[in-house]
């Protein structure tokens, strides 16, 4: 199956006739199929980018500590809309909004064909985590304990959401790339005049290949939206509430 192939429910149940519970079950079946068919391999690439970003960030700032403060200032500026002084609910909702917005940008970057720009998101996240660990190490803090109490509780869900969103974005980049390549090939053939012959069947219009390509890209977008709403957003919401209500009390 190609990356642009639609993921259909095994029982073929039409969404119009499904109950809300049945629709949700069908969407989860589609999601599991999309994970096995498309996302799993991209998830591995995203996890490697996260690990490489962490190692690169940690080692870089450990060897050049003078550059930590400037890099940390950029991180603080990017997070200046998040206030840790307010109520836990406000903090949780602000964190959710901030992370959801970043994930939307990461997935949307996949609209650029074949460049696989979403892979930058886990790499940058890993680099920031490496920076924080380097700063903590130079300040004499217990880095393993810091990771265990201040990162791990919410990070399990937040980083999983980051990796999943990256996987979806990479899948989108491949899908838009294939659609763009197919459109370019058809345009090239038409310019050469090789499509001047009448259609093989009067029931098949000349623009049928274009409709097929549009249908394939539509299936990709359907999968992207479903995966983001069904998986990425709930994980980010759970991570935000853990970070807002539980993480501050862990020392």
Image (cartoon, rainbow, N blue to C red):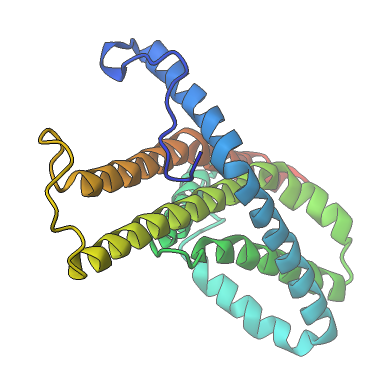
Residue 99's spot in the image, x, y percent? 50, 53
The answer to whether residue 248 is above or below residue 132 is above
Residue 248's spot in the image, x, y percent? 68, 47
Residue 207's spot in the image, x, y percent? 16, 48
Q: Residue at (56%, 50%) from the top-left corner?
A: 167
Residue 125's spot in the image, x, y percent? 63, 63
- Decide which of 68, 251 is in the foreground and name it: 68
The answer to whether residue 29 is above or below residue 145 is above
Q: Is residue 45 left or right of residue 140?
A: left
Q: Residue at (57%, 71%) from the top-left corner?
A: 76
The answer to whether residue 231 is above or below residue 107 is above
Q: Residue at (55%, 42%) from the top-left corner?
A: 38
Q: Taking the image as drawn, is residue 178 in sight?
A: yes
- Decide which of 231, 148 is in the foreground and name it: 231
Q: Quadrant of residue 71?
A: bottom right
Q: Taking the image as drawn, is residue 108 in sight?
A: no
Q: Residue at (25%, 64%) from the top-left corner?
A: 189
- Decide which of 216, 231 is in the foreground and name it: 216
Q: Is residue 4 left or right of residue 234?
A: left
């Amino acid at each position: 199956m190609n990356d642009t192939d639609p993921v259909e429910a095994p029982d073929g149940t039409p969404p119009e006739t499904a109950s809300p519970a049945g629709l949700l079950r069908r969407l989860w079946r589609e999601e599991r199929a999309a994970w096995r068919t498309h996302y799993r391999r991209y998830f591995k690439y995203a996890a490697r980018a996260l690990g490489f970003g962490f190692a690169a960030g940690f080692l870089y700032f450990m060897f050049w500590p003078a550059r930590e403060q400037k890099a940390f200032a950029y991180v603080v500026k990017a997070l200046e809309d998040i206030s840790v002084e307010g109520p836990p609910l406000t903090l949780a909702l602000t964190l959710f909004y901030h992370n959801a917005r970043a994930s939307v940008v990461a997935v949307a970057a996949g609209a650029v064909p074949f460049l696989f720009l979403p892979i930058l998101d886990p790499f940058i996240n890993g680099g920031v985590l490496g920076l924080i660990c380097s700063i903590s190490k130079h300040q004499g803090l217990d880095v393993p304990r810091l990771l265990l109490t201040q990162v791990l509780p919410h990070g399990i869900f937040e980083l999983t959401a980051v990796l999943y969103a990256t996987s979806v974005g990479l899948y989108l980049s491949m899908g838009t790339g294939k659609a763009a390549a197919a459109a370019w090939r058809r345009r090239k053939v038409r310019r050469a005049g090789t499509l001047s012959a009448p259609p093989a069947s009067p029931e098949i219009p000349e623009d049928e290949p274009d409709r097929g390509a549009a249908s394939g890209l539509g299936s990709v977008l359907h999968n992207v939206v479903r995966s983001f709403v069904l998986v990425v957003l709930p994980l980010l919401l759970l991570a935000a509430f853990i970070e807002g209500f539980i993480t501050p009390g862990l020392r």
